[in-house]
């Protein structure tokens, strides 16, 4: 017998009650039945995202939400600074270029995080920059930045700040209103514990003003003016993934029942335990500024990432993630988002030890589990 266990950094494991909720009979989406779910979901999303700003629900992935924000917030005369420290930071620069937006693409070493000092320097050098796009938690490198500090710099220079929070919302401390983040972007299939298919945007008054002032540069399907107009009526401009929204309400209930501070603490403990376990059995943590939502570990000499991941899945049903682009074959990643807890994490660490031991890596069997247990004993 083998159970399937999802430890990828998206899509993440979904609670059974959420899946069952979406399996129930449903009504047409242009009804009060659907509007009730939209109203409920929007209110609860504001609580999970710790914001009183407008929240928009889009049928599409986190990339769809990001594209809507990049195109909608950057009209004629805009110049966008994108901070690119990984695959997803680079994606946002590529989207801006594709839509003809004037973009300054700031490259950063993968595994390092963009800093407030770097942003301050960029904005001092180029006064024409009107907005900044940053990735709070860069999934491809398992790296987190200090979003609060970057937001302070953007406020000081009076620049619009858009943040990719796709693997930070619901996992890492996030307080956009207090910090001054104008656009918060996330997706369903990460910490919000749903299958893929929904993107979310939190929009400050400054962001809404930029969207309204943008008369020439909007996508059609991902048009935020259309989306905001319909959201005011608890509706969508186009056919929504309404069963996902129904499941979203239940998933948000689960998060809010635990409490966001408790969620952040649990995720941080699982990440710290995984990093400690990796180091205890001779695996280097890749990131110089590790994110708590996903951990990237370097394999030991002589063991290939592809073979290790295949062994984890074949023997224990554990699906992990490898590296992307320049990190392919150099790291493997274990997620701490979605429907996972500390016991799931211990199981994954034990399975990792078993596979590495069988593959010939020399270490003291049980050292990783012991290190993780000590972290949990201290933190939870």
Image (tube, rainbow, N blue to C red):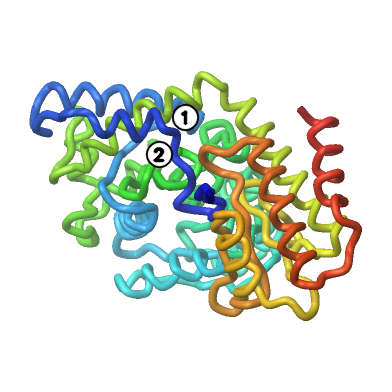
Tell me which corner region of the image, top left, top right, bottom left or bottom right, holds residue 272: top right
In front of the other: 367 or 206 = 367
Crowdedness near tag 1: few (<14), some (14–19) or many (≥20) residues, C-alpha within 10 Å: many
Q: Quadrant of residue 243?
A: top left
Q: Is residue 137 left or right of residue 194?
A: right
Tag 2 secondary structure: strand
Q: Is residue 109 visible?
A: no
CA gap between label 2 and label 1 equals 8 Å
Q: Position of residue 365 (x, y in %)?
A: 86, 55
158 on left or right of 363:
left
Question: Which element type, helix, strand or loop, lies under badge 1?
Answer: loop
Relative to 123, is 235 on the left or the right?
A: left
Residue 63's disc number: none
Q: For this rendering, which residue is in front, 19 or 248?
A: 19
- Residue 311 percent coordinates (x, y): 62, 66
Please tell me whether residue 191 is drawn above or below residue 150 in the rendered image.
Answer: above
Q: Are marks 2 and 1 in contact (CB under 8 Å)?
A: yes
Nearer-the-camera pick, 203 or 173: 173
Question: Residue at label 2?
Answer: 202
State which quarter of the image contains the C terminus.
top right
Q: Residue at x 17, y 57 (%)?
A: 220
Camera-nearest residue between 37 and 147: 37
Mark positioned earlier in the residue sequence (2 or 1)? 1
* Residue furthest out toward the right: 364
- Farthest residue in the top direction? 257
Tell me the residue at 54%/55% (across/down).
8
Kindly identify which residue carries mark 1: 51
Category of crowding for the residue at label 2, using alpha-carbon neighbours closer than 10 angstroms: few (below 14), some (14–19), many (at least 20): many
Q: Where in the figure is residue 58, as x and y percent of width and height?
A: 28, 45
Q: Residue at x 63, y 50 (%)?
A: 150
The residue positioned 45% from the left and 44% from the top of the image is 184
Residue 380 visible from this viewpoint: yes
């Amino acid at each position: 017998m083998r159970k399937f266990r999802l430890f990828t950094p998206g899509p993440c494991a979904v609670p059974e009650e959420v899946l069952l909720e979406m399996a129930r009979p449903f009504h047409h989406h242009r009804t009060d039945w659907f509007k009730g779910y939209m109203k409920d979901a929007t209110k609860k999303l504001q609580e999970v995202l710790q914001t009183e700003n407008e929240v928009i629900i889009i049928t599409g992935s986190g990339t769809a939400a990001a594209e809507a924000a990049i195109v909608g917030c950057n009209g004629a005369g805009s110049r966008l600074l994108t901070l690119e420290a990984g695959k997803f930071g680079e994606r946002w620069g590529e989207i801006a270029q594709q839509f003809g937006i004037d973009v300054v693409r700031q490259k950063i070493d993968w595994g390092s995080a963009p800093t407030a000092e770097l942003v301050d320097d960029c904005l001092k050098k180029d006064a024409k920059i009107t907005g900044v796009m940053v990735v709070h938690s860069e999934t491809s490198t398992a790296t987190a930045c200090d979003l609060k500090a970057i937001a302070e710099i953007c406020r000081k220079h009076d620049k619009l700040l858009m943040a990719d929070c796709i693997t930070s919302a619901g996992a890492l401390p996030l307080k956009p209103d207090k910090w001054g983040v104008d656009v918060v972007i996330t997706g369903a299939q990460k910490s919000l514990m749903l299958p893929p298919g929904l993107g979310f945007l939190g929009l400050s008054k400054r962001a809404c003003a930029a969207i309204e002032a943008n008369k020439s540069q909007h996508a059609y399907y991902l048009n935020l003016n259309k989306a905001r107009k319909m959201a005011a009526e608890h509706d969508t401009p186009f056919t929504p993934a309404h069963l996902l929204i129904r499941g979203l309400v239940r998933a948000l209930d689960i998060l809010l029942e635990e409490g966001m501070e408790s969620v952040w603490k649990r995720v941080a403990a699982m990440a710290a335990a995984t990093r400690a376990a990796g180091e205890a059995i001779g695996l280097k943590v890749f990131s110089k500024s590790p994110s708590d939502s996903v951990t990237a570990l370097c394999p030991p000499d002589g063991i290939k990432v592809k073979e290790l991941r295949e062994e984890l899945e074949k023997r224990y049903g554990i699906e992990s993630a490898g590296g992307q682009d320049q990190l392919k074959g150099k790291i493997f990643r274990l997620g701490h988002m979605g429907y996972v807890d500390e016991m799931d994490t211990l199981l994954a660490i034990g399975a990792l030890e078993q596979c590495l031991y069988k593959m010939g890596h020399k270490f003291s069997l049980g050292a990783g589990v012991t290190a993780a247990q000590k972290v949990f004993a201290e933190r939870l």
